[in-house]
Image (cartoon, helix red, strand yellow):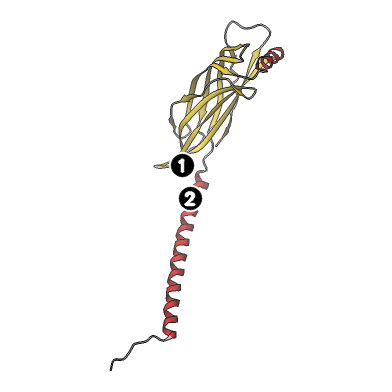
Amino acid sequence: MSQALTKSPKHCGKQGLNIDKLYKKLFYAFSTFLLSILSLIFLVWLILHPTKPDFSLREADIYQLNLSATPHLLNSSIQLTLFSKNPNKKVGIYYDDLQVYASYKGQQITVNTPLPPFYQGHEDSNLLTASLVGAGLPVAPSFGYEVGRDQTAGKLVLSLKVNGRLQWKVGTWVSGRYRINVNCIAVMPFGPTIPSGPLSSKQGTQCSTTV
């Protein structure tokens, strides 16, 4: 006669407890590992703490700003020079997808002009130049009136904008891509007499930068 082997409820209960303990140990080990990684990343960030780059407008020249009466289409030509500096002592910066354009009273008056990608080392600086143009760009009917008001006031105010992406570099590690937006204000003397040369701004204004 064969004898059937059976497990007591007490034995099954102990096995269930062992499995629960194993899951808890794995959960605590994973949580500890994840917390250590996050703490290390936070510590590195606190030590390095990348500072956003500095941009300033060195020079802006308007060579053309012609408006046709009907329809309201604008032809423009602007040359600008920007100064860019990486203030970080231990962090490099990669720039790419940079696009530059000019706007007046909230209206874009040139097409987007790309800048080549570049790397900026620790505390390095660069001069960036761009030729901005617009051919037959539609503008609001009030554009000519606004320019006339600025001429009466004796100054023309333009916004020169740079949009793109950047990445932080620490040693061999490179971060993900972050959006960067730069806005520079150019104030140009603009009296009742049209000058023979271009309208120029050379006051070296600081630009606002967001990352």
**40, above or below 15, in the image:** above
Q: What residue does disc 2 label?
A: 41
Q: Residue at x 55, y 28 (%)?
A: 55
Measured in 3D between alpha carbons, the distance from the residue under mark 1 to the one under mark 2, in whole angstroms, is: 14 Å
Answer whether labels 1 and 2 touch (C-beta < 8 Å). no
Name the image quarter holding the N terminus.
bottom left
The type of residue carrying mark 1 is Gly
Q: Position of residue 54 (x, y in %)?
A: 54, 31
Would you place residue 26 above or below residue 106 in this image? below
**Mark 1, secondary structure of its residue:** loop
Which residue is pictured at 47% across the width and 52% down the height?
40
What is the quadrant of the C terminus in the image?
A: top right
Which of the 4 quarters of the picture holds residue 196?
Answer: top right
Give whichever of discs 1 and 2 has the lower sequence position. Answer: 2
Q: Quick one: SS at disc 2? A: helix
Q: Residue under label 1, please give it.
A: 176
Percent position of residue 194, x then y: 63, 7
- From the viewer's perspective, is 180 left or right of 117? right
Q: Position of residue 125 (x, y in %)?
A: 48, 28
What's under tag 2, amino acid-wise? Ile
Q: Nearer the viewer, residue 178 or 9?
A: 9
Q: Quadrant of residue 121?
A: top left
- Residue at 61% over, 15% down: 72
Q: Could you say which is closer to the camera, residue 89 or residue 145?
A: 145
The tag on residue 53 is: none
Q: Few, some or many C-alpha atoms within 10 Å of disc 2 (few <14, some 14-19, many ≥20)?
A: few
Q: Nearer the viewer, mark 1 or mark 2?
A: 1
User: For the residue carrying disc 1, how many other residues have a C-alpha within 10 Å: few (<14), some (14-19), or many (20+)?
Assistant: few
Residue 163 percent location from the top left of the image: 53, 30
- Is 3 drawn above or below residue 143 in the view shown? below
* Viewer-proximal residue among 9 and 3: 3
* Residue furthest left as drawn: 1
